[in-house]
């Protein structure tokens, strides 16, 4: 979908004195150094935060005036940290902050407070997280309703979408890598926190799917972005407004509910396979595809082996399985060595049951959250990949559901996972996708790579869950059929 299909920004507002104030960031830095590392979306935990660099600032509401009205300040800041990993951009990760300012905020905003600057242009005002203030969240919706430009920001809206005014705002507290606000039961705004230059896949892919008439994914209604300094090239996505599918059931919770009452889930899994294949087919039609040949397949296998070795060093329990797991990656590389190739296209990139919704009426599945794995660089997330990567990730999600509940290692739950995984693959094939079980080398390699990722994640964040991916590691090391569980 071209830019001309959307209503674009035309109104320009000159930078205000606050934004140009040289001591703005220096006066906020001590407060941000305490507040930012505590946020769930901060990606640099475990490394010393040494300072901030201001990338851009926009005053959406006056922040230094007299009276009791709140101000609203949007910042892009780069966090400087010690010993950055290789994936970190030069200069550190960039974060988007939306800060409210108020001389004396009401008591209900106490959990949102960042602090009170002792100097600079905001001296004497309390600074707080604006996304916890329903009034300021409402202002963001108003900006998105009427496209235009304010400072460095552009607010854009699809021309055929009506965004009502005055919808009540409520933040969603469970998200980690981003922040979301629900407006009434009509729209949801995702505000990206860790920012990389370029179009975010959570805007790019749903817009492409809307253009392909794929109804499995909510189409974006509006978004805001920051342009490159010279106004050429791709703008950087900062937030996306999409329809809120009120009343739909979260796929993860639906699966857990079925397990809790020992109910069959194969019909739902088969239908979800249909939905996944429809999305993949539409993406392949709407966006460029490519063929992975020997050099590309060698590179993918090498990256998988590198992740395996790094994880085994960090999580010693994985060490005994390294040799047998490597055979999965060697088999992937062998496809190219045999002169074969494999199709690659744009995919979801982080597909699991929690990224799916099923409607109450009709039981129709939808896929959401196309951002991909936030920890991976944006360029990597936008790269064409084999569609079986999404399929393998969903198979792991079924296995997680079966092993994470009270049933745990109950043979019935393990059989539930096997039948559910098989039904999902069947549904995928029925809807026109290549039967995932006909590509055993790719399926085993991608499911193994996903399980290795899970081992590292659980060891670092949820040690009590480590047994779940380790059960998959033992199965995959024994060359089990990835489609059957």
Image: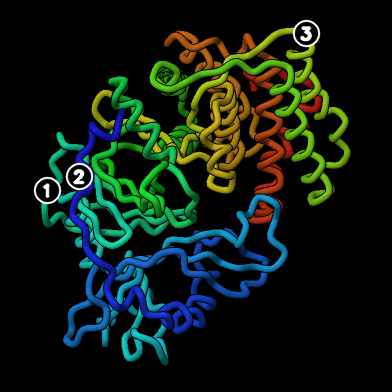
Q: Residue at x 28, y 82 (%)?
A: 107
Q: Is residue 400 left or right of residue 16?
A: right
Residue 57 percent across, percent down from the top left:
37, 67
User: Dot 3 lies on which element?
Assistant: loop
- Residue holding disc 1: 164
- Residue holding disc 3: 338
Quarter of the image holding residue 470? top right
Q: Nearer the viewer, mark 3 or mark 1?
A: 3
Q: Quadrant of the N terminus?
A: top left
Mark 2 and mark 3 residues within 8 Å of each other at the beta carbon? no
Q: Quadrant of the C terminus?
A: top right
Q: Is residue 207 left or right of residue 264?
A: left
Give the answer, above or below, for where 23 lies relative to 183. below
Give the CA distance from mark 3 to mark 1.
Answer: 57 Å
Q: Residues within 10 Å of mark 2 (few under 14, many from 20)?
A: some
Frontmost residue, 155 versus 69 = 155
Give the answer, above or below, for where 242 lies relative to 40. above
Quarter of the image holding residue 365? top left
Looking at marks 2 and 3 on the same chain, the residue that comes earlier in the sequence is marked by 2
């Amino acid at each position: 979908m071209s830019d001309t299909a959307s209503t674009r920004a035309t109104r320009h507002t000159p930078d205000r004195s606050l934004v140009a104030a040289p001591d703005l960031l220096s006066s906020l830095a001590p407060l941000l150094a305490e507040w930012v590392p505590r946020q769930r979306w901060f990606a640099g935990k475990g490394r010393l935060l040494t300072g901030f660099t201001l990338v851009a600032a926009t005053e959406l509401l006056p922040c230094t005036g007299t009276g009791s009205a709140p101000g609203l300040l949007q910042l892009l800041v780069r966090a400087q940290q010690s010993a950055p990993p290789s994936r970190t951009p030069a200069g550190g990760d960039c974060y988007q902050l939306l800060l409210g300012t108020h001389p004396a905020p009401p008591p209900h905003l106490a959990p949102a407070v960042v602090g009170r600057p002792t100097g600079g242009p905001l001296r004497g005002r309390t600074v707080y997280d604006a996304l916890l203030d329903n009034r300021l969240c409402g202002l963001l919706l108003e900006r998105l309703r009427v496209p235009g430009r304010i400072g460095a920001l552009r607010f854009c809206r699809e021309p055929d979408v009506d965004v009502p005014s005055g919808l009540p705002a409520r933040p969603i507290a469970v998200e980690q890598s981003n922040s979301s606000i629900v407006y009434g039961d009509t729209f949801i705004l995702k505000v990206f926190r860790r920012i990389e230059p370029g179009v975010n896949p959570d805007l790019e892919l749903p817009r492409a799917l809307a253009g392909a008439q794929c109804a499995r994914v909510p189409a974006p209604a509006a978004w805001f972005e920051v342009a490159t300094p010279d106004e050429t090239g791709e703008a950087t996505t900062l937030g996306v407004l999409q329809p809120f599918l009120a009343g739909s059931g979260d796929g993860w919770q639906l699966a857990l509910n079925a397990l809790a009452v020992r109910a069959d889930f194969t019909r739902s899994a088969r239908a979800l396979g249909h939905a996944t294949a429809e999305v993949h087919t539409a993406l392949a039609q709407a966006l460029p595809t490519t063929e992975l040949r020997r050099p590309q397949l060698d590179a993918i296998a090498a990256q998988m082996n590198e992740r395996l070795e790094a994880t085994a060093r960090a999580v010693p329990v994985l060490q005994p399985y390294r040799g047998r797991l490597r055979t999965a990656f060697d088999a992937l590389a062998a496809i190219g060595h045999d002169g074969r190739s494999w199709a690659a296209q744009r995919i979801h990139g982080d597909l699991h049951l929690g990224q799916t919704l099923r409607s109450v009426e009709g039981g129709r599945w939808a896929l959401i959250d196309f951002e991909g794995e936030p920890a991976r660089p944006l360029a990597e997330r936008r790269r064409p990949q084999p569609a079986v990567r999404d399929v393998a990730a969903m198979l792991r999600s079924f296995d997680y559901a079966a092993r994470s509940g009270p049933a745990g290692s109950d043979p019935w739950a393990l059989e539930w996972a096997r039948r559910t995984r098989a039904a999902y693959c069947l549904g995928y094939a029925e809807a026109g996708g290549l039967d995932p079980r006909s590509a055993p080398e790719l399926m085993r390699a991608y499911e193994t790579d996903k399980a290795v990722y899970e081992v590292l994640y659980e060891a670092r964040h949820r040690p009590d869950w480590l047994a779940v991916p380790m059960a998959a590691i033992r199965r995959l090391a024994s060359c089990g059929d990835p489609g059957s569980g």
